[in-house]
Image: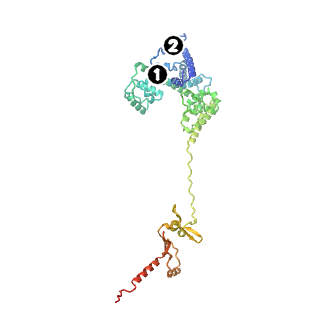
Amino acid sequence: MSSLADELAADLDFSDEQSVHSEDERHNEQNQEQDAMDTNEDGEPTKETDRSASDASPSTGHPDNVHKVTKFLQSKQTKDILERIEHFKSRDRPGAAPTEEDEEYQLIVNANSMTADIDGEIQAVHKFIRDHYAPRFPELESLILNPMDYARTVKAIGNEKDLTKVDLRSILPSATVMVVTVTATTSNGKELSPEEWKVTEEACDVAFELDNAKRTIINYVESRMTLIAPNLSNVVGSSTAAKLLTAAGGLSAFCKIPACNIEILGNTKKTNTGFSRASMERNTGYIISSPLVLSVPADLRRKVTKLIAAKCALSARIDASQTSPSGEAGQKFRNEIDQKIEKLQEPPPTKVIKALPVPDEGPKKRRGGKRVRRQKEAYAMTELRAARNRMAFGEAEEEVEYGDETEGLGMTTKQVGKIRASIADPRNKVKAPKQQQRSLNTAGTTSGLASSLAFTPVQGIELVDPTAAAERVKKANEKYFGDGAFSIVRK
């Protein structure tokens, strides 16, 4: 019985020559075992084998009978396990936990390991249905990815062209039903022949039977796990507990495994060609895929997995010693796990906002004021000094000899204008005493503020006295009009 990965690798021709030979040998051995299984006591093949051998489709590459793809339900082992499950379900179970030598205990272990095989068979049947129903509705396989939902939808639609007459609301969500209905109106599929539809419908029925068998096994195993390992079931759940015991080989063998190895029980490495390893996680098993771990945020799952593995080891040893048959110890461990998960998910404490310190209201050092501003204004650089410090590019600077030294004039000789000394603001001026102010007012000297400097590019800097110019004008006027009011005409 080939798995889904082997079938995909064979379909895509990714296997090399060595793998092809090994695959052929394995198929031959399986065919021989199946032929022996399907042969009656007289050595004659059964009717089922004759029918499957006679069904062949030379026109297409796909098998025309679903029983060529899967023979799981027809195998003797599957029928025997399902019959024994129904037998033990109808029989009352004693209160004591079964031992590993018990017949029902072995049935639970074998049935639990069969669920993985059923999943592979469902995938194979799903591929068979897709290949045969693609001519009718090729877009349906991209709209519905779940194998069982796809089989139910195919069974409900059939050869119906108008999907508005088909009720899919009990199978698919409303949004998916709308997408399928709209896509069917633009699909270029053709109607299947009665023979092709019969083969497809039979494959859908086989998928339903496989799903029912899987549900029967899971429900039975979960119902019996509370008797075999009640504490372990309370910690991780009945389904995960059954998988762990199956992988370990029993409760006694599971008790001998340390917690660090329980964490990776059920780890499977897919090394087949064509399968991506990008999304595969290392050291993962049944515990990390349990509902309890999946309900935790992704960044905390590794910590929670280690925590659960430690509690599983303790719970299994309690179950082996039967010191807590009611499962109270396991429930206590589960409560501790839930509390630690809540603690891990708590937000960090908020940052304490510190109050501002009390301001210092003491005396402060004054770094400025009216007096400092007046001092800066008194020694500020004037426009004349700024022009003296400037030089024209590529031109010689005029110099003035002063004793044995020379001083450069900069650009003062290149400008025309007057530079008047800045007049201080009387509001900021320091007032002198009244007696000293009277003596200053009586003085007839010309204030230095009345003088100004004039500079020209020809004569340079010269001192101009406004009162001297007024005196010259006055003298000229007196000379012109000095003889009197009337002119004297001499005879």
Residue placed under numbered mark 2 in the picture: 46
Distance CA(mark 1)–CA(mark 2): 21 Å
State the image coordinates of residue 296 (x, y, percent, origin top left).
55, 37
Q: Residue furthest top?
A: 42
Give amino acid for label 2. Answer: Thr
Residue at 54% across / 35% down in the picture?
294
- Left or right: where 431 falls relative to 191: right
Seen from the viewer's position, the closer of residues 403 and 359 is 403
Secondary structure beneath dot 1 equals helix
Residue 28 appears in view: yes
**Image label count:** 2
Residue 360 pos. (x, y %): 57, 62
Residue 381 picture location, percent across and down: 53, 67
Q: Residue furthest front?
A: 491
Q: Image point 48% across, 16% down: which residue? A: 52
Q: Residues within 10 Å of mark 2 (few under 14, many from 20)?
A: few
